[in-house]
Amino acid sequence: ISTVVLGALAASTAQLARAGQAQPQAGPGSFFGPERWAGRTAAIALVWVAFLGYSFFLAPGKGPEAQAADQALLNQVLSTPFDGSVSPLFVCIFNMLGIWPVIYSATLLPGAERQSPVPAYPLVFASFFLGAFALS
């Protein structure tokens, strides 16, 4: 997890460093103008860190009873997912967790060679194990 945080911090720092450079199609006062990049990047980084902090420190379910209930639910979904004891919506979303990184990779990888300084391949690969936090 600390690797993901450090990787995101490095990517945000690289993007902030690149933000000072002139961006293509940047007219005065346009959305993609150089005066907007540093603030936008910093805001996105702060939101990402806030979500990450909430998920690790403030999210509910850290007690032993909640962890036991989560473990029982995961055991049920993994052993017999379609027996009707677990909500079909939950089973559908749980199974989509493996498909969602493939959808993201289909949108990220075609333009990956034009995106610098961070290549998309390690982030897409990490998303199969760490979820959306690896893609941010």
Image (cartoon, rainbow, N blue to C red):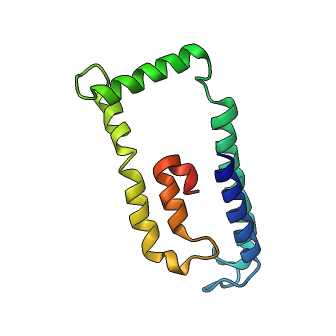
Residue at coordinates 64% horizontally, 52% vertically from top-left?
4
Quarter of the image that includes the N terminus: top right
Residue 66 vertical placement versus 128 (above, below):
above
The spot of residue 127 in percent (x, y) is 50, 53
Residue lying at the far left in this picture: please name it.
Answer: 83
Q: Is residue 24 visible?
A: yes
Residue at coordinates 71% horizontally, 85% vertically from top-left?
22
Horizontal side of residue 11 vs 133, given as left or right: right
The spot of residue 108 in percent (x, y) is 46, 67
Q: Is residue 47 visible?
A: no
Residue at coordinates 72% horizontally, 70% vertically from top-left?
14
Residue 91 vertical placement versus 106 (above, below):
above
The spot of residue 89 in percent (x, y) is 32, 32
Residue at coordinates 55% horizontally, 57% vertically from top-left?
135
Residue 30 vertical placement versus 57 (above, below):
below
Horizontal side of residue 28 vs 110, given as left or right: right
Horizontal side of residue 110 vs 114, given as left or right: left
Residue 86 vertical placement versus 135 (above, below):
above
Quarter of the image that includes the C terminus: bottom right
Indicate the quadrant where residue 59 lies. top right
The spot of residue 70 in percent (x, y) is 48, 23
Numbered disc total: 0
